[in-house]
């Protein structure tokens, strides 16, 4: 009988200790499941460091040979204008003219005055943004030579790029992470908690866009970092 009572007492003590351990373990799990997920934003304005400027003009005529000769003359004038204003040979590219035979079109009008419609494009690709923008405002020099640079065609819009993203990535990620932590600390304070370790974090994609429609040569770089922290009492 004494042996049975002793064993029962040992079993009861064991069950009690097991219960305490389970309860502490559950509380510990609950503490670890107390988390807060925040986002940190970093933005930076940077000047574009590359410009692509298509100089497109149109020409018309009935004599194909004469039309090509006129295009070559105008192309030489454009290249001369560019090079005399600091544009280098390697920054200039030229594509063959696009010729449309108006009488060969499916719905051609027999009353067209000119049979051939030509589109010629000379493209400047440069990292000297200021100089290229200056030349854009001086296109009247070409107009005096009978060359009217056309606009409005989406295929030949001026485009500006920022290619130095890798140089600013570390700084922006650091700023975004700091902003995320500041938001998490504010949440922890408001909830009478303390901020614990990072549970996980993810970096969003960097986006580069024009600052606004009037200054496409100034870019806005943006990144959002998502961080999950543990909260503790």
Image: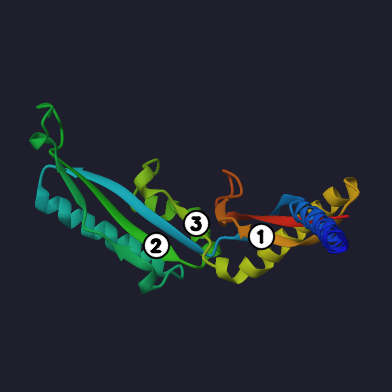
The label shown at residue 75 is none
Residue at 49% from the left image edge and 56% from the top image edge? 160
Task: For residue 202, say whether it is visible.
Answer: yes
Q: Quadrant of residue 7?
A: bottom right
Pick the front one: 120 or 145: 120
Please identify the quadrant where the C terminus is shown. bottom right
Q: Is residue 151 above or below residue 26?
A: above
Pick the front one: 66 or 37: 37
Q: Position of residue 103 (x, y in %)?
A: 9, 35
Q: Which residue is mark 3?
A: 160
Secondary structure found at label 3: strand
Q: Which residue is mark 2?
A: 124
Q: Which residue is mark 1?
A: 200
Mark earlier in primary sequence (2, 1): 2
The Cα–Cα distance between marks 2 and 1, rounded to whole angstroms, is 46 Å
Q: Position of residue 65 (x, y in %)?
A: 10, 53
Q: Nearer the viewer, mark 2 or mark 1?
A: 1
Q: Pointer 1: residues within 10 angstroms few (<14), some, or many (20+)? A: few
| Residue contact between numbered discs 2 and 1, judged by CB atoms under 8 Å | no
In the image, is 21 to the left or to the right of 220? right
The Cα–Cα distance between marks 1 and 3, rounded to whole angstroms, is 36 Å
Please identify the quadrant where the N terminus is shown. bottom right
């Amino acid at each position: 009988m004494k042996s049975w009572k002793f064993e029962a007492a040992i079993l009861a003590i064991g069950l009690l200790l097991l219960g305490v351990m389970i309860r502490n373990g559950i509380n510990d799990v609950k503490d670890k499941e107390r988390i807060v997920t925040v986002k940190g934003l970093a933005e930076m304005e940077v000047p574009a460091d590359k410009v692509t400027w298509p100089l497109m003009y149109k020409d018309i005529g009935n004599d194909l040979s004469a039309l090509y000769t006129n295009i070559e003359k105008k192309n030489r004038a454009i290249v001369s204008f560019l090079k005399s204003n600091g544009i280098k040979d390697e920054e200039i590219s030229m594509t063959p003219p696009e010729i449309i035979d108006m009488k060969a079109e499916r719905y051609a009008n027999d009353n067209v005055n000119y049979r051939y419609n030509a589109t010629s494009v000379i493209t400047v690709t440069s990292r000297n943004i200021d100089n290229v923008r200056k030349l854009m405002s001086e296109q009247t020099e070409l107009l005096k030579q009978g060359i009217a640079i056309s606009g409005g065609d989406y295929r030949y819009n001026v485009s500006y790029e920022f290619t130095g993203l890798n140089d600013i990535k570390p700084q922006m990620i650091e700023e975004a992470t700091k902003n995320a932590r500041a938001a998490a600390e504010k949440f922890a304070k408001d909830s009478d908690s303390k901020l614990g370790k990072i549970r996980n974090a993810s970096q969003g994609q960097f986006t580069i866009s024009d600052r606004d429609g009037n200054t496409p040569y100034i870019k806005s770089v943006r990144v959002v970092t998502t961080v999950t922290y543990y909260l503790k009492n």
